[in-house]
Image (tube, grey):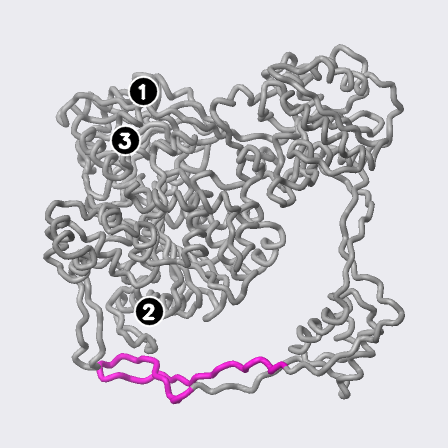
Amino acid sequence: MNHLFQALSVRVDEWRKARYECSNFPAIAEILDFALEDPTTDQLRYLRRAQFRALETYWYLRLVLHTPRIPELYAILFPKPKDRREAMGLTSREIVDMIADDSLEAVLELVQTDNAFVRKHGLESLRETFSLEYPSYILALAMGAGKTILMGSIVATEFAMALEYPDGPFVQNALVFAPGKTILSALRELADIPFERLLPARLHKPFAASLKLTFTRDGDKQIPITLGSRFNLIVTNTEKIRIQKPIVRNAAQSRLFAGTKDEEATAMANLRLQAIASLPHLAVFSDEAHHTYGQKLLGKWEKNKETGELVFKDDGIKKVRRTIDYLAQETNLIVTINATGTPYFERQPLRDVVVWYGLGEGIRDGVLKELANGIKVLELGDGEADRMVQSVVDDFVKDYWPVALENGAPARLALYFPNLETRDELRPSIESALLAHGIGPDTLLAVDNKSSEATRRSFEAVARDPAAPHRVMLLVNMGTEGWNCPSLFACALVRKLATSNNFVLQAATRCLRQVPGNTKPARVYLTASNKKTLEDQLTETYGTSLTSLHTQQAERVEKTIYLHKPQLPALLIMKRVLRIQRKAVPADVAPLVFTLPDVSAPVGPVVQTWSPVLTASGDTRMQRLDAADVLLESFTPLLDCYTAAARLAACHHLPTTELLAALRQVYEAQEVPDHHMEALGQQIEEQRNQYEEAWDEIEVAVALVKADGFDVAEVNGKPVYTARISFDKKNQHLYKTANETADAAHALRSSFHYEGYNFDSNPEAEFLDWTLGLLQSHPHQIEGLWFTGGLADAGKTDLRAEYLGDDGRWHTYTPDFVLRRADGKHLVVEVKNDKLSPDIDADMARHALGQAPQTLEGRKAVALKRWEQLNPDRLSYHVMFADTALHDAGKKTVLNFITAKVIAAPAAT
C-alpha cells in the first residue's frame, strides 16, 4: 500500500463504518446516507459507485483531515519516513542513499529549490506538488465514470453545507475550467443534474433557490455575476478567463481600455478573471487535470522598469495553473479539484491523486463495455494500411452493423489517422470496403480540427442523435477527450499515431463507454506499432495491460427500467404520526416576561472610492483615492409589536395575545428592531421549554410508485419514464421482463408496473410466476400484482415503513409485493429465507404482548404489522418463508385473498 489513494481509501472505509461521524457538521452524514437508495443492497440513489467513493473521499479530506495540502497529507498518511519516501516515488538508489546520509526533509528541500536535482531525477511532478500553496487534489477516474456529475455533486454538497452552516469552512462559489470547446460542451451536463436526488429535501430546497449557474459565452465582455456574491457555479473554457499576459502583483488596478484586438481580448479575459476573483470562499474544478499540471521550471519574477512592480513571467507553468495561482492570491481559495483519466505528465505520475478508478475497475463495475476477445492486432506494417482498413471495415460490418442501442442508435466505428494525407490516401479503400457490403459512402464522416462548422455539427450529432446517418468516422486530431459517443463500439488506430499526451490511449479507449442494457463488447483494432505504444500508456496510466483488459469481465450490470403504469392507485391507510408539542401552561405559572435584548445592530456596508487614472505607459487603470474604508450607518427594520408577536407565535406555538402583552411591557415605542427577534425567541424558550410527545392518527395516501422520481423524456409526443439500476452480474438471472413469463400479455396486464423487475432471490421470482399462474387459473377480482421491493427510493415510492435499526437510528423498509383487490383491500407480502423464521415469529409474539422486537428482521415485520392493525379493513401483511423454493404453508393466505368473493369498492384517488 504505497500510494496516497490506497492509504486514504482504508481510512475512508473506516469513516463509512462509523457512519460518517462529524460532531461539528453532522449534516454531512445525512447527505452521504441519502445517496444510498437501499442500504441492504447498497443500491445507490443516483451516483455510480466510483462517483460515490470519490465524494466520500473528498468529504473525508475536507472535514476529518481539514483540507490538508498534499505534503501535509503525505505526512498524515505515511508517518514513517521510509513509507513516505516510497509513496512519493523517491526510490532510486542515489536518493535512498542521500536520505540515509541526511534526512528525507533535506531531500524534499532539494526538490523544492534545486532545479538540476529535479531534472536529473525526473521529479518535476513532485516539485509542482510541493510548490502549491493551496490544497489541490486529483480524482483519477477512467472515462465514462462520470467526472462531470461528480464535480456537480461536490459543488451541490458544498453549497448545501454552506447554507446549513453559514459560518462553516465551506465553499460558497465554484469555478469549473474546461480546456477546450468540446469539453465545455460536455460540461453542460451540469445543468441537467437532478440535484434533488443528491440532497435530502430539506437541504435541496434552499440550495435550489440559491444556485446560480453560468456558462461563459463568446462575445460577452463580462461574466454575468454580482461581484462578491455567493452560490455561483461558473463554467468556462480557459481561453475566456485565463491570464493572457503577465499579471502584476497589485491586482487592485484594472485596465479599462485596450488598443489592438489582441490587447482587447487580453483585457476582456482578465476583466472576467477579476470578476471571479471577487467571489469569496471559492473552489476551482479543472476537467482533465493534465491541462493544469506540468511545470517545466522556466518561471521567474521580474521587476517592471516603469512601475517597479513585480511581474511573473513564465512559459513553463501552464496557463490554467497560473490562473489558479492568481485566484489563490486574490480570494480565499478553499480547494482545487482536478479530474482526469490520465494522471501523468511526461511519463511522471502526478503525486496528488487521492482517488484512482481505472479501466479494469470500470469494466468490472459495468461502467465500461467489456473488451473480452475484442482487441484485434493486425500484424501489418504501416505500408499495408490499405489492407488494414479493409479488414477493419469487413470485421465491423460483419459483427456490428446490425447492432443498435435501446434508443435506436446504430453501432459506430471511429478510425484515427495520424494526418490528413493518410486519411485522404486511405479513404477510397474504406469506401470500396463498404460498397462491397452494399453500404454507400454517405455513412462516412471525415472530421479534423479545421473542418467546417457544418461538419462539426454533424460530428456532434453522432454523439447525441440516434438518427444521425453517419456510422464510420474518419478522424484526425479529433474524437479523444471530451467526446462522449455512447453508440461508438469500435476504434481503429491506422498507422503509427503520435505518442504525446496519451493520444493512443485516448483514441483506443474512446469506444468503451457503456450504456445501460447493452451486452455487446467493444472492439479495438491496432497495428503492431500502435500496440506497443498502447501497452506502455496503459501500464503508465492505469497500471494495467492489454492482456488484463482482454480478459476482464464485468462483475456488475447496469439496466434501464421503464415505468409502464405511472398512475397506480394509492394505498389509503391510517398511520400514527409522532408530533412534538408544547405542554399546556398551568394556570399558576407566572406570565411571560421579556427583558430588552442587549444586541448590537448589524454593521453597515464598507465603501471605497476609486477613479480611472492615466499611467506613464499610456494605460488607463483604476486607482484608489481614499486612504481608509468608510463605514456607512447601519439600518435595521423595525416591526410593530403586533407583527413581532405574530412571528414569535408562529415559531414558538404560543398565543399571540400573551406575546403581545409581554412585548408592550418592554417596548414603549411599540416598535421592535428586527435584530432583537432571535434573542426574544431565546427568552421564550428559557421560560416555556416544556414539551411532550403526542401521537396522531391520520389518513394518508401511500403512492406505490411516484413518476416524478423517474427520468422523463418525450417520445412520439408521449412521456417515457426511466431509471437506471445496477446489480451484481451473478444476479442477472433474477432480472425479469414480461417476455420471460409464461404469458407476456397477461403479465403486462396484471403486473410489471415497471420493467424489468430486479429480484433479490429465486423465491421472489418464483412468487411472481406462481401468483400470475393463480390469476390465470382461478376466478378473481385482483386489480394488480406488483413487485415493490426493487424500488426503495423515497423519490419513487411512499411504501416505506419506519423501524429502529441496530445502530439506534430510524430506517425504512419496503416490502416485496402488493396485491390490490377490487374491494380496495391490499395484501402486502414479504418473502424471507426460512432461517429468519424463528426471529420474526418471536418478535411478532413479543409485539402481541406489547413488548419491543429484539431483532432487525423482526423490527421490519412489526413495522408493517402496525400498519395492518391500524387498517384491518384495508391491508393485510403476510410473510412467506422459503429456502430454495416457497413453502406450501404460506401459500394458503395468498390463495384465499385472491379467490375471496368481494364487492368492488369505488376507485381510489
User: SS of the residue at dot 2?
Assistant: helix
The circle on residue 567 is none
The amino acid sitting under disc 2 is: Gln
Q: Which of marks 3 and 1 is nearer the N terminus?
A: 1
Residue 181 appears in the rendering: no
Task: Give the residue drawn at x 19%, y 77%.
Answer: 304
Q: Residues within 10 Å of mark 3 (few under 14, many from 20)?
A: many
Q: Earlier in the sequence, mark 3 or mark 2?
A: 2
| Image position of 593 with respect to 312: above or below | below
Indicate the quadrant where residue 3 lies: top left
Badge 2 vs badge 1, beta-carbon distance below 8 Å: no
* Most frequent secondary structure within the magenta stretch: loop
- Return the x and y of residue 240 as percentages of the image width and height: 34, 60
Q: Name the residue under label 3.
A: 415
| Image position of 271 with respect to 200: above or below | below
The answer to whether 752 appears left or right of 220 in the picture is right
Q: Mark 2 points at which residue?
A: 329
Report the magenta residues as a range: 599-628
Nearer the camera: disc 2 or disc 1: 2
Q: Name the residue under label 1.
A: 373
Quadrant position of the C terminus in the picture: top right
Quadrant position of the N terminus in the picture: top left
